[in-house]
Image: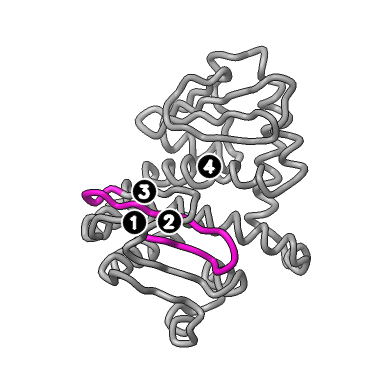
Amino acid sequence: MKNQDALAYVNMFAVLKDLEVLCELDDEAKKLASPAKPVSISFNVGGGPKATLSFSNGKCTMKEGLGGQIKLKLASPEAFNLMVDGKKNPTPYGGFTKLKFLMNDFTKLTDLLNKYLRADEKSLKNRAFFEKSTTLMFYLVANALSAIGNNDELGKLSASKIPDGSIAMEIAGGPGAEIVVNGGHMTTYNRKAAKPRAYMIFADFDTARGLFDGTTEAMSALAAGKIVMKGYIPMIDNLNRVLGRVGTYLA
């Protein structure tokens, strides 16, 4: 069972944050993220997360907190989750002259992201598309780990048992993320870890995809050497317990 408050943090800091990666990988996304003048959108969720997405020169960046030109208010985490699902419209309270970007280019960006994250079998047969889609899923999962570890009750319990330090999560020859734990609080960075205490490495894109989709069993992949876990294993053991909650929120 998922908690609506925790889901709001997943939707903000994993799903919408994935727009950063999308704009790095996809040419159409780069064009959509290239307004004539920089545009920023703040999401003000009552009793929940607050963040600002900025678009300029083909790039998207997310920062915690408000201050964007376009100001969107969502009354509650539940309302924000409905917005992400396309079932509710936010209430603008500023930046009305920029709403054209919100209604057109931003909507196209989120539709494009959805195309990659919920890809059909035909699209996935194209290897370039498959690797982009899997990269986006990789960062979605990596960022969801921290959102769940910090906001879901079972996730917080597991996160509290992770020793302090840095964990490297990577696809061999592909993307990497760093998960930093400090006093049970988790922070994900979309970068390769410089000096991790522990590693979780997927052998290739196909292995990572199978695990994300649930078509590959983790223990079988470990036995076959398709997943490498090394370093300070107590970190990985408890991280895996948080990972076990990710599917509940991303289903």
Residue at image position (48%, 83%) is 225
Crowd class of label 2 (few under 14; some 14 to 19; many from 20; radius 10 Å): many
In front here: 181 or 32?
181
Residue 241 is a magenta residue: no
Q: What secondary structure is the stretch in magenta mostly built from?
A: strand
| Distance of label 4 from label 2 (alpha carbons) | 19 Å
Residue 17: mark in rendering: 4
Q: Earlier in the sequence, mark 4 or mark 3?
A: 3
> Magenta stretch?
167-185
Read off the residue under disc 2.
Answer: 193
Q: Where residue 177 sits: x, y (%)? A: 47, 55
Residue 205 drawn above or below residue 154: below
Q: Where residue 25 sits: x, y (%)? A: 68, 49
| Distance of label 1 from label 3 (alpha carbons) | 27 Å
Q: Earlier in the sequence, mark 1 or mark 3?
A: 3
Report the mark closest to the observer, 1 or 3: 1
Amino acid type of the residue that numbered disc 2 sits on in the rendered structure: Ala
Residue 3: mark in rendering: 3
Under circle 2, the secondary element is loop
Residue 90 drawn above or below residue 213: above
Read off the residue under disc 1.
Answer: 166
Q: How many marks?
A: 4
Q: Is residue 55 left or right of residue 186?
A: right
Residue 124: mark in rendering: none
Residue 175 is a magenta residue: yes
Residue at image position (56%, 59%) is 175
